[in-house]
Amino acid sequence: MSSAAVNELLQQLPQIVAHKSLVLYRLPYATDTNLLIGDAQEIHSLIEALGNEGFAFTPAETSHGHKPYLIIPDSTLQIEAMDKVQFPSFQTIVSNTSPIISSQAEYLAQANLVIAAIKSGGLEKAILSRIKKHEIGSFNPWETYKELCAAYPAVMVYWVSIPGVGTWIGATPETLIKLVDGQAETIALAGTQKDLGNNLENVAWGEKEQQEQAIVSDNIQSLINEYYPAESIDVDGPKTTSTGALLHLATTFRWPAKQDVSALEAFIKSLHPTPAIVGQPREAALNLIAETEPQDRAYYTGLLGPVSRNGYTHLFVNLRCMQVFNDYLALYVGGGLTAASNPDAEWQETELKAQTLLSVL
């Protein structure tokens, strides 16, 4: 479709988005953006999403009151050249519920509680998250989306607006599962440091980060073995990977997986939430998070991505994301705590992760 035809269609958006959901997403290393406009259908099981065509947007395991949705498109559009598109301005959909923002002192107190709980036994690791408030005078979602696409080609960039729910924008590096032609792929991603532009093969990692990666990788490999015992698994890593601003340790797992929706749902539910976003063991970590974090994670650490009955499905963990409000943005960030963690260093890690989004604002 020509740029003129795309622009003509886009000019209809202001009249549409008042009562329809809007999704834009750019997959890792892709050059084009996918635009979906349709109805957000509340779902009660992943089977409802995996057995349909559309875009899944589900909340965190610990969230209360936030519903899982499948956006079923009435129309779709592929935008190949974003710089040639005249995206119209319209009122951004915002949530009526304000999140809880923790101060640095409050976060440090929470981190100390988590570390003490880990040291007392029963937990290897727990993820503590917080929300960073960034005040804005004006905000253009389209320009921010374009900047994220340009800055972070290796991650999935998205913009989701759902009437009655709000607007979320993010640049997430973490694939939960990808299915293409009967082949499955998932990635264990844990450990974080700033990307200083050095050769990735020469990057050094501390014991704490290596331990985090090992916990996540071991958990994922055991689950694949449990649900796909007859299949051989190709394991690549751990390797240092860059998302543009940050470095992570990543291990990629690939294996044959049949398009059995019920079996796939069971595997995903066992896999998600992974130790990378809650901790290990999972139930103990979830209980500790519920006791310690004052905020609702909402759609942070939930799942999102395109789904298809028989074709391409790619679900991501919703990291490096923000929620749009009238005069500020709520940035959701977190980090893995172990017995060896330093609360001040963990605070700085969350500040570093927030820069993924702040750097383009």
Image (cartoon, helix red, strand yellow):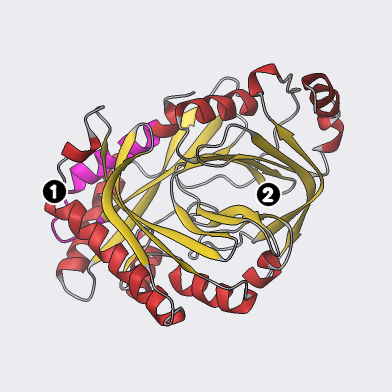
Q: CA distance from mark 2 to mark 1?
A: 40 Å
Q: Residues within 10 Å of mark 2 (few under 14, many from 20)?
A: some
Mark 2 — residue?
165
Describe the element under mark 2 as helix, strand or loop.
loop
Classify 212 as above or below 137: below
Compare marks 2 and 1 and give the one earlier in the sequence. 2
Q: Residue at x 22, y 68 (%)?
A: 124
Judge left or right: residue 7 versus residue 285: right
Describe the element under mark 1 as helix, strand or loop.
loop
Depth order, front residue of 190/260: 260
Give me the disc on residue 143: none
Residue 307: horizontal and vertical position, in percent? 66, 58
Decide whether residue 123 is among the magenta residues: no
Judge left or right: residue 295 versus residue 306: left
- Residue 139: name its quadrant: top right
Classify 190 as above or below 77: below
Residue type marked 1: Gly
Depth order, front residue of 309/118: 309
Q: Residue at x 51, y 41 (%)?
A: 28
- Residue 6: name its quadrant: top right
**Would residue 275 be visible to someone looking at this image?**
no
Mark 1 — residue?
206
Depth order, front residue of 350/103: 350
For the record, the magenta segment spans: 337-355
Q: Residue at x 65, y 35 (%)?
A: 33
Residue 92: horizontal and vertical position, in percent? 70, 33
Depth order, front residue of 237/269: 237
